[in-house]
Image (tube, rainbow, N blue to C red):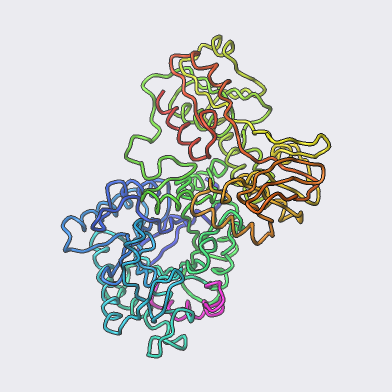
């Protein structure tokens, strides 16, 4: 068989193990963690899914090595806790039995202890330790570790590695990036010590060397150790790429893989985890430069999911290994699809941060495009239906396509009718926004999946009750979506008013000065688009904050992008009248005129409920899904569609 991506499919020998390809699963936090730090039952299925999907290695994250000085709400491993070693052994076995290498990340948060705690008041009661005395940006004091504590932590890393090996893990990853404790010692910004652990680089790497040496002595010479580091801290006062290369050179003799990430939680969450506003693979250059300075395999990570791009990275020698985190949440089968020359079937990550926003809110995992995440043992895997039925899906947006694909994979005879001339629904609008192209491509991927699953796709085919009655389906899934709301305030007949659809689908271009009415997620993204293209943009929102419908991870990043783009923001502002030269708004300070030659309506969507209601009695089984129920988000649409098809 000729591989379309031969470099990605090539095995790699690392220490005493063989990676079956060059695609690995990044450290991903467990889905459920018990009160004592033991992995819960769902965690096993969570990691197993990535192993079944073909990843070369799957890394469990994060194992806190020294709870006495790190109160983070993450995994812990101790023989003193009955059953804990066994729980980890079951997780390691679940990974290994599918041919993947089972790895685990050894971690200490240092002064960022408690980062993932849901109870933020409890986090404030912790004692935060770091290399030096100081104060965190949120005002919490940091206490310098004593040399006795440092020695105890070094021993704890070794103990954790030994227990992980005993549990059946075949590799360990030592986390020395992102502003965590080892990184804090490496960083001139955090490390202000005047003893042998501070000052020049040879002193700042001492703690890392002691940790890695102790781990090596514990696990033996053939047991692989992967070092995760930031190639550059990417903020003023932190170390740069040149010093990152020197750090890698100073530590390479103690490790088998150098895993190059980027940045620090201190200043750049969207850098460490590249947001939709950054290029795919924006951090690869860090790994590429470090690879020139070391003699061990180098891994790269960050916003990677396209097999052609990943193939080029490995083939050109920029890195030896591709590591994916969020991408393998969206589609755990990326490696298997690449190996089988099915790259066009990959469901790519949207980089929407739903997965990372859910953890601090509910302590669970959720993915916008993969409803199985964290719920692998809840009967959500696609299995054949006991009886094949005739299914009609009305609407070719994401909800309609997901439900049609799942139903077809279960063995049903599925017909999907779309009133328009192409599939995609509201996702078609995202093609106009460079930072939302992944969402547009999601629709393209599902169109391919539906076609290959045997769905009978009928475009330009509106469905009413008469059509559905004549079709005589056993089950009807109604996914007719929503439509844009129109402005309710007076609009001068000479004013130029555009909807989002006018611009994104029909190509209408606003003038040089734009007023966007509606500061939800859609309005904010529209304002950002035109501000980046050189327009003067005024953004009007009647509520007291912008983008309140965005998740807690994506929202601050989006707001920062709006500020950087120079968008003129007005909250607590009610649009009173649209005129040819602008919009009159009422604010707490009084009425004012926002000048503009174009007004954009972005006040939201309205369900096509009447169309949906007309189909409620057209089959024994009828389910309404997605925006036809209520305008929400892609996560809700995918989940409802998936379950509707599973219930037939």
The furthest residue to the right: 494
- Establish if 275 lies above or below 486: below
Seen at 56% across and 50% down, the residue is: 544
The quadrant of the picture occupied by the C terminus is top left
Seen at 40% across and 90% down, the residue is: 194
The furthest residue to the bottom: 195
Left or right of 125 on screen, residue 139: right
Asked whether 165 or 369 is in front, the reply is 369
Task: Indicate the position of residue 421 as horizontal and vertical percent values.
Answer: 69, 27
Task: Indicate the position of residue 377 as horizontal and vertical percent values.
Answer: 32, 40
Instruction: Mark yes or no: residue 258 visible.
Output: no
Asked whether 437 or 294 is in front, the reply is 437
Task: Indicate the position of residue 249 as horizontal and vertical percent values.
Answer: 48, 79
- Establish if 246 lies above or below 51: below
- Establish if 513 lies above or below 239: above
Count all numbered tags in the image, as a single digit.
0
Seen at 29% across and 72% down, the residue is: 69
- Is 91 magenta? The answer is no
The magenta span reads 233-256
């Amino acid at each position: 068989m000729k591989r379309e991506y031969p470099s990605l499919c090539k095995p790699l020998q690392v220490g005493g193990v063989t990676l079956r390809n060059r695609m690995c699963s990044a450290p991903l936090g467990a889905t459920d963690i018990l009160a004592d730090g033991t992995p819960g039952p769902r965690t096993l299925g969570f990691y197993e899914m990535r192993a079944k999907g073909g990843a070369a290695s799957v890394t469990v994250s994060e194992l806190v090595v020294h709870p006495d000085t790190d109160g983070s709400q993450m995994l812990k491993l101790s023989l003193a806790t009955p059953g804990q070693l066994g729980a980890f052994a079951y997780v390691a076995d679940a990974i290994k039995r599918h041919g993947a290498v089972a790895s685990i990340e050894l971690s200490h948060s240092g002064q960022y202890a408690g980062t993932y705690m849901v109870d933020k008041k409890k986090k404030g009661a912790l004692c935060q330790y770091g290399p030096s005395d100081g104060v965190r940006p949120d005002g919490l004091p940091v206490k310098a570790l004593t040399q006795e504590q440092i020695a105890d932590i070094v021993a704890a890393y070794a103990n954790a590695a030994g227990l992980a090996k005993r549990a059946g893990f075949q590799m360990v990853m030592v986390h020395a990036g992102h502003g965590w404790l080892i990184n804090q010692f490496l960083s001139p910004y955090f490390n202000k010590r005047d003893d042998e652990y501070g000052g020049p680089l040879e002193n700042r790497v001492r703690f890392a060397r002691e940790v890695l040496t102790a781990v090596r002595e514990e696990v033996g010479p053939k047991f692989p150790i992967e070092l995760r580091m930031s190639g550059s801290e990417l903020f003023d006062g932190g170390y740069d790429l040149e010093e990152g290369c020197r750090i890698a050179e100073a530590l390479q003799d103690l490790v088998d893989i150098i895993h190059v990430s980027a940045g620090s939680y201190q200043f750049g969450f969207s850098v460490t985890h590249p947001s939709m506003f950054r290029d795919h693979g924006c951090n690869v250059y860090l790994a590429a430069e470090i690879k020139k300075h070391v003699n061990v395999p180098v891994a790269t990570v960050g916003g990677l999911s396209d097999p052609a791009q990943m193939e080029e990275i490995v083939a050109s020698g920029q890195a030896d290994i591709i590591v994916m985190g969020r991408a393998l949440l969206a589609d755990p089968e990326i490696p298997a699809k690449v190996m089988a020359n099915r790259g066009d079937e990959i469901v790519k990550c949207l980089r929407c941060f739903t997965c990372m926003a859910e953890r601090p809110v509910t302590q669970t995992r959720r993915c916008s495009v993969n409803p199985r995440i964290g719920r692998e043992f809840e009967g959500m895997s696609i299995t054949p239906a006991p009886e094949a039925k005739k299914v009609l899906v009305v609407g070719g947006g994401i909800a309609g396509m997901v439900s049609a694909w799942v139903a077809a994979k279960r063995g049903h005879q599925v017909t999907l009718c779309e009133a328009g001339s192409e599939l995609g629904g509201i996702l078609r609008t995202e093609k106009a926004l460079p930072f939302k192209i992944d969402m547009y491509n999601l629709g393209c991927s599902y169109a391919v999946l539906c076609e290959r699953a045997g769905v009978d796709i009928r475009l330009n085919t509106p469905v009413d009750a008469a059509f559905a009655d004549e079709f005589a389906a056993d089950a009807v899934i109604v996914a007719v979506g929503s439509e844009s709301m129109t402005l309710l305030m007076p609009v001068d007949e000479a004013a130029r008013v555009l909807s989002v659809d006018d611009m994104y689908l029909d190509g209408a271009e606003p003038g040089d000065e734009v007023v966007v009415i509606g500061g939800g997620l859609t309005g904010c993204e529209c304002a950002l688009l035109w501000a980046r293209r050189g327009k003067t943009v005024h953004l009007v929102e009647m509520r007291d904050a912008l983008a309140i419908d965005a998740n807690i991870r994506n929202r601050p990043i989006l707001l920062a992008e709006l500020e950087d783009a120079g968008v003129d923001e007005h909250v607590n502002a009610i649009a009173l009248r649209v005129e040819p030269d602008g919009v009159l708004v009422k604010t707490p300070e009084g009425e004012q005129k926002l000048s503009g030659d174009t007004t954009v309506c972005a006040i939201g969507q309205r369900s096509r409920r009447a169309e949906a209601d007309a189909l409620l009695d057209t089959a024994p089984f009828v389910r309404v899904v997605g925006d036809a129920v209520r305008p929400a988000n892609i996560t809700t649409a995918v989940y409802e569609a998936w379950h509707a098809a599973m219930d037939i």
